[in-house]
Amino acid sequence: MIADDEEVIRRGLEKITSRMDMEVKVIGSYGNGAEAWEHLVGMASKDVDLLITDIKMPMMDGLRLIEKVREHNKNINIAVLSGFSEFEYARRAIKHGVLDYLLKPIDKVQLFELLKRVEDDKRKREAREDEELSDQQSQSECGEHYVIDQAKSFLEREYMHNFELERLAETVGMNASYLSRLFKYKTGQTITDYLIGIRIGRAKLLLREHPDLKNYEIAEKVGYNDPVYFNKLFKKMCGVTPKDYKSGMRAAGGTEGKTTK
């Protein structure tokens, strides 16, 4: 963005920058500080990489413009245009953290070096932000992985009790609905399906190692108070009832792979 009350200076800057082998776009060219400020204040800081401003301008001079810009955003690069007779103003402007000052008439080499420095700083800043973003994502993924592991451990430890999603969420320190979505996203299973898998797995183990246990006893030990429901669920998951599973294991000599109806 350019602010200078001399139109020939503004046009000259635009012409010079357009001929440079750089990706530079003049997004605003204004004859006084007030007009420049009016447009600048409504823009995001990322939309303006450099403000080049004259010192002496009507309505609002360059020093006041710089002060207001610094109050609004401290990260915008600012360069001051000045003549030799305005050196004292330029020195005061530098105290406000301007990046450089350009003497009139404009030196093309100095302008190029200024724009190149702004461009390089921008690339470094964006690269740094991308590293930081990668670290944040990595930390987030590690945190999510930890939460899922904690949830799995809780389910494997508490599978025999009535399941309460709110209690699980409180244990891992996460919102219940978000935990449900995260668990499904990370494991491909709902929390309920994962819990059913644990319970049926424990039931099969009990049927193999404790064949003397009654059906309702096994159901209670794996978290189901209704043996009829447990029976239906087991058959749905395993293709056979608990009783037939136990009979098949006996006929196969305790080998699960030969289970028959």
Image: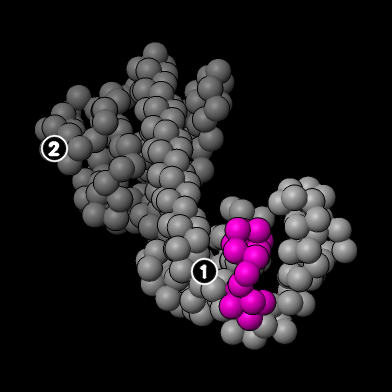
Q: Is residue 58 above or below residue 84?
A: below
Residue in the picture at 26% in, 31% down: 99
Quadrant for residue 226, please give it: bottom right
Q: Is residue 232 left or right of residue 112?
A: right
Q: Nearer the viewer, residue 224 or 247?
A: 247
* Local crowd size for mark 1, using a 10 Å CA cut-off: few (<14), some (14–19), many (≥20): some
Q: Residue furthest top?
A: 109
Residue 86 pos. (x, y %): 18, 32
Magenta stretch bounds: 201-218
Q: Is residue 3 left or right of residue 63?
A: right
Distance from disc 1 to disc 2, alpha carbons, whole Å, reads: 67 Å
Residue 246 pos. (x, y %): 74, 64
Say which residue label 2 marks.
Answer: 95
> Quick one: label 1 or label 2, which is nearer the N terminus?
2
Which amino acid, mark 2?
Lys
Residue in the picture at 47% in, 49% down: 145
Quadrant for residue 219, please give it: bottom right
Q: Is residue 204 left or right of residue 155?
A: right
Which amino acid, mark 1?
Tyr
Say which residue label 1 marks.
Answer: 159
Provide the secondary structure element on which disc 1 rests. Answer: loop
Q: Nearer the viewer, residue 247 or 234?
A: 247
